[in-house]
Image: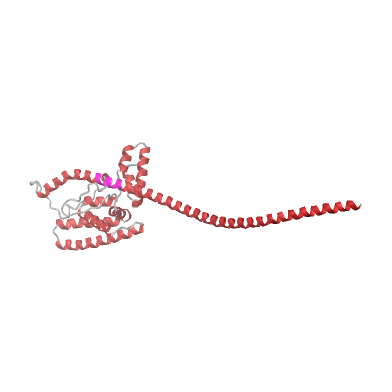
Amino acid sequence: MDLESAARELYALLPGEFTAARNAKAKAAAQDGNKELARQIKELPKPPAAAWLVNMLALHHPDRIDDLVRLGQALGEAQEQLDPQRLQQLGRQRRELLAALAEQGRELAEELGNPVGAAAATDVEQTLHAAMADPAAAAAVASGLLTGPLSSNGLDPVDLGGKVAVPGAVEAVPAAGRLPGRRQPPAGGPPGRGARRAEQHARREPVEAGRRRRAEAEVDRAGERLEDAEEKQQRIRDRLDELTDRREELEDQIAGLKHRLAGLEREVSGVEQQEAAAGKDFEAAAKATARAKEALRQARKQLEALS
């Protein structure tokens, strides 16, 4: 197992399965003695809904992503050639393709049992739009390893810092001359404002990417803590429900025993009354027996006197 193969398996899962599977892979790598790989896997961020859905489109409908990339290249060529009629035709195709892909994405999310909301659907469309504007963004989308949504202003390169799980696994998409809508400085000429802005962006990117990765890692850790807390809360809720059911069962048994006890107490009271009456009858019978014995004795005495 290497980082790319682990990432491809993880980013093909449903969001609810990601964290547990990532932790299991990291643990397996650590047990195999590869602590560095375990650390890298552990740092793979869980993709938000929009990035997850774009990854699913790349996985389940790669042909539509290819259509998207080809259309983006055609738009770049038309802009290079300053062909307004072609640009108008391709612009209409772009709108139709983005709308169709957005709808296909929503249907795919429902089929996979993880529907997304309106905000995520908007981020999906913006990410696909960015893939059409920048070959590097197109390659990131086609990789199926996005860790966050993308956006493009049509001028600057799409910021991919921290947005691909394994940047080295992204295959380059051939660019159509230059990025659509982006002016290139004359060959051999002094750097213009666009070049200076690109240089400034290149200097800022590592710092911003590091901050973004740390922020995303903290978000991921916070998400894990939330999942752990929710799991613990659910376990306690289940235990509470079990205890509540047991308490109600015991209360029912107590109520039944109280009813039985009341019946037994009434029965004891009746028996006590019968016992008292039987005692009086016994005393009367004892007296009658004594009188009978005395009468028998007197009769025998008289009989002996007559003999």
Q: Residue at coordinates 29% horizontally, 56% vertically from top-left?
A: 63
Q: Position of residue 157 (x, y in %)?
A: 18, 50
Q: Is residue 151 left or right of residue 295?
A: left
Q: Is residue 270 above or below residue 30?
A: below
Q: Is residue 89 above or below residue 294?
A: below
Where are the magenta residues, as a range? Answer: 213-222
User: Which of the pair 295/204 is nearer the observer?
Assistant: 295
User: Which of the pair 5/120 is nearer the observer?
Assistant: 120
Q: Is residue 156 left or right of residue 245?
A: left
Q: Position of residue 101 (x, y in %)?
A: 28, 59
Q: Position of residue 131 (x, y in %)?
A: 23, 54
Q: Is residue 28 magenta?
A: no
User: Which of the pair 121/299 is nearer the observer?
Assistant: 299
- Quarter of the picture containing the N terminus is top left
- Number of numbered discs on residues: 0
Q: Main secondary structure of the magenta part?
A: helix
- Residue 122 visible? The answer is yes
Q: Position of residue 59 (x, y in %)?
A: 32, 53
Residue farthest along the left direction in this orientation: 190
Q: Residue at coordinates 11% horizontally, 47% vertically from top-left?
A: 196
Q: Is residue 112 left or right of residue 127?
A: right
Q: Residue at coordinates 30% horizontally, 41% vertically from top-left?
A: 40
Colour option used? secondary structure
